[in-house]
Image: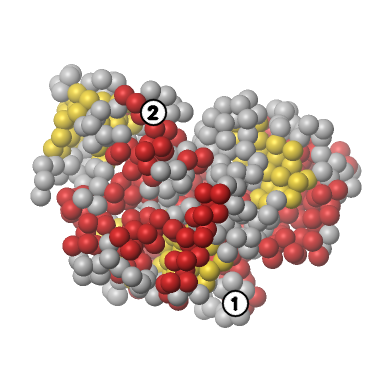
Amino acid sequence: MGMTQAEKILARASGRETVTAGEFVVGEIDLALLHDIFAAGVFDMLVDVGVDDVFDPGKTVVVVDHLVPAPSAEAAAIHQRIRDHVARLGIESFYDSGQGICHQLLPENGHIRPGALVVGTDSHTTTYGALGAGGTGIGTSDMVYALATGRLWFRVPETIRFVFSGELQPSVTWKDVILYLAGRFGADAAQYKAMEFGGDGASRADMSSRLTVSNMAVEMGAKFGLFAADEVTDAYLLDHGGVGCDPFGPDDDAVYEAVHEISLADLAPQIAMPSEVDNVSPVGDAAGLAINQAFLGSCTNGRIEDLRAAAEVLEGRHIAPGVRLLVVPASRSVMKEAMDTGVLATLVDAGASVLAPGCGPCFGGHGGLMGPGERCIGTHNRNFIGRMGSAEAEIFLASPATVAASALMGVIADPREVEVKDA
Amino acid sequence: MPDETMVGRVWKFDNDISTDVLSPGQYAVAPLEVRKLHVLESVNPSFAQECQPGDIVISGTNFGCGSSRETAPENLKAVGVACVVAESLARIFMRNAVAVGLPVIVCVGVHDAFEDGHEIEVDLATGRVRNVTTGVELQGDSLPEEMRGILAAGGILEVLRAQGGRGT
């Protein structure tokens, strides 16, 4: 009997020939990621349990991305503690304030390998499934255990496979696809399970799109959101870190809990309405609602492809009066490329405020929070109550093109309508 | 192994209670004494103040969805919650609850079977849930032995301490 991609990852990590969904295994950790919300606390806890090193400083990556630039003296002090711990523990892969969001930096710098078991103190660690890796979020106590021992317990998940066929229509993106899946199947459809994204449609998706989809797999409850590693993965890895990869994916005779066929050509731009990620409709259903803020960024959609898509909508135009457009490139290298290619100038000319790479507004930390009664449309991944400041603010989630079109019109808008007006 | 059955007063919540509701982002790095006071405040402003040690939270589906912040189960534990019984639990929340020593179980039908203030009896080992007030009994998912072992130790850090800070 064949194995799913998740089973293959956990079998290798636990030194077994095969594993089956439902089993508990102890897996060897290939990479552990910590970011600045939790890193100092985790390292303090490690000291508290009497452990003065980490299992492998070369397999530990620390990123300062949530509280950047430090919004308070307390945040700055947390960063100081992190720097002290990182130096003490000999961790080389340390991305300090301003370099970008962890889920952008790790793929960008070649840390993620197909088949690897990656744990992070962040739910969006599922992002690494885009490269065929078993990335999953854990909490701080589990991270302390993982750093001390190099291992962690896992339940081998059942897998739901999504098979994509056909081509997306113009102005429809893989952000729309993952929102559609959340809406159709529900925010807990993949609870404690793995999702696999396959079929011809998935193999045509570029890496930026795959990162968006795997990133949001956790919004359906998934433990992993996996694409097979293929030529697209190989080319990306050669560009980012310089070491390509062999194909890696599920066996043809793997056993799935369910298999769903999705026709990409049938999809329209989608929008998640307040206050659940699975409250999804075609964007037309929300069209015309006035917005106060538009947010282009996050680990979901802050890459160069996303900024470019927004710039294409906003080229030579200006956002509506009374709308704030926040642009947060996912990393410094994304920002640099956006500068070098004129994308950033287009966005600034259109009225955007550009913020330093980081997570600030997306997790409700700082730098673009909402007041009561305000409405935001963003490219990020969560629209929960209170996610961006006031519990009385409303958050809508959509693609970069839809967010740009909405900023332009001052109301939620279908990007296809905006383009039609131009023609 | 400590007693795996418990009886407590019910606080009832609906579907999709997220980690942003359990541990709002603005207080992400605030000390426990501060941040616990904001647990669930956007859906029930008096909960944190009025929750008593031993009270039990009942919820609909996807409880604890969202981020990996362990402060979510930690806040619940800190205001006295003895157990969460949900129609379904978000994966990382469930993992984190076990890691910090907060018992959680899944029990389909629990949301309809309870109201605020009812008394509930929960057995982690068998998954049996009983409404003491109405007499209704439900069969939930028993918690796997691996997780109950961590809970019995008082959380995964206690497991680690018992192992002398290293793997077994």
- From what the image shows, is residue A77 above or below residue A402? below
Would you call the spot at circle 2 few (<14 residues within 10 Å), some (14-19), or many (20 or more)? some
Viewer-proximal residue among A349 and A160: A349
In front of the other: A48 or A309: A48
Residue type at tag 2: Asp
Note whether A97 is above or below A362 in the view shown.
below
Q: Quadrant of residue B127?
A: top left
Hey, what amino acid is under mark 1? Gly
Relative vertical location of residue B52 with respect to residue A332 in this rendering, above or below: above
The vertical placement of A78 against A203, above or below, is above
Q: Are marks 1 and 2 in contact (CB under 8 Å)?
A: no
The residue singled out by tag 1 in the image is A241
- Residue in the foreground of this view, choosing between A170 and B107: B107
Residue A244 placement (x, y as % from top left) = 57, 79
Identify the chain of the residue marked 2, using the numbered disc in the image.
Answer: B
A168 vs A94, left or right, is right
What distance separates the C-alpha of mark 1 from that of mark 2? Answer: 46 Å
The quarter in which the N terminus of chain A is drawn is bottom left
Residue at 52%, 72% in the rendered image: A93
Q: Which residue is mark 2?
A: B14
Q: Residue at x 33, y 31 (%)?
A: B59
Q: Position of residue B10 (x, y in %)?
A: 26, 25
Give x and y (percent) for residue A257. 37, 53
Query: Residue B72's spot in the image, x, y percent?
Result: 38, 42
Name the residue furthest bottom.
A243
Q: Is A148 placed left or right of A130 in the picture?
A: left
Q: Is residue B151 left or right of residue A7?
A: left
Work out whether residue B99 or residue A266 is closer to the camera in this orientation and state it. B99
Check disc 1 and report its element: helix, strand or loop: loop
Chain letter of the residue beneath label 1 in the structure image: A
